Image (cartoon, helix red, strand yellow):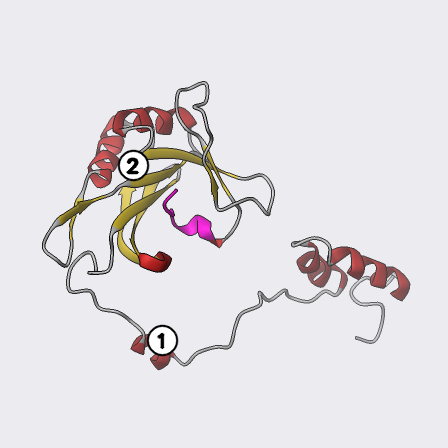
Amino acid sequence: MSGPAYSPFTTWVQIVYDWLDALKDPNGLKTFVNTTLGETWEEAVGEKLDHQVLMDKVVHYTAAVPARVVYLTAGIDSQRNRFEMYVWGWAPGEEAFLVDKIIIMGRPDEEETLLRVDAAINKKYCHADGTEMTISRVCWDTGGIDGEIVYQRSKKHGVFRVLPVKGASVYGKPVITMPKTRNQRGVYLCEVGRTPQKKFSMPV
């Protein structure tokens, strides 16, 4: 870098101050690198593994639900033209297995679409020991659609079985916060922290 970074009218002293300020904000450093330095931000990743090393770690299930799994949960992501549902199996030590992924196309406010979501929620999975398992707890995203749709389905399936969730407005919140009381719509609207854990629903 030969001059004051990407901002030619910014002094080095100001750049140092900007850098120190950027370190205080999770997104600040990215903004600093992109705008002040004029460089492309690259997310920090661990040591890259050879693809064969990753392939060797793949676990092939002999049944829909692995033997160690004792509990099934699901997370439903709401979009304007579809619902995406991920079913996770949980084993001791919080070991997680992705058991199923279901994409349900259709308008979120149409009953026909919601009936297919109902069927996915009530789907039974074969455990390695031959028994059938059902999904014990579902977290359903209210963002991007009318939250009332999710509220009504929560009441239909059971307010403790299907939990409406919304993303936290700030970083640093717990993975999920279960309210002690129902909201005005009669359901338990949970808050999900803005962390990688939002990708799947953990038992609460």
Secondary structure, mark 2, is loop
Residue 47: x percent and y percent?
Answer: 51, 77
**Amino acid at circle 1:** Leu
Please provide the residue range marked out in magenta. Answer: 197-204
User: Residue at point 66% right, 59% down?
Assistant: 30
Please state if 75 lies on the left or on the right of 165 as rendered.
left
Within the magenta stretch, is there residue 198? yes
- Specify the label residue 54 is tagged with: 1
The C terminus sits in image quarter: top left
**Residue indicated by mark 2:** 106
53 above or below 123?
Answer: below
Is 104 colored magenta in this rendering? Answer: no
Residue 24's spot in the image, x, y percent? 73, 54
- Helix, strand or loop at disc 1? helix
Q: Relative to 55, does residue 114 appear above or below in the rendering?
A: above
Quadrant position of residue 161: top left
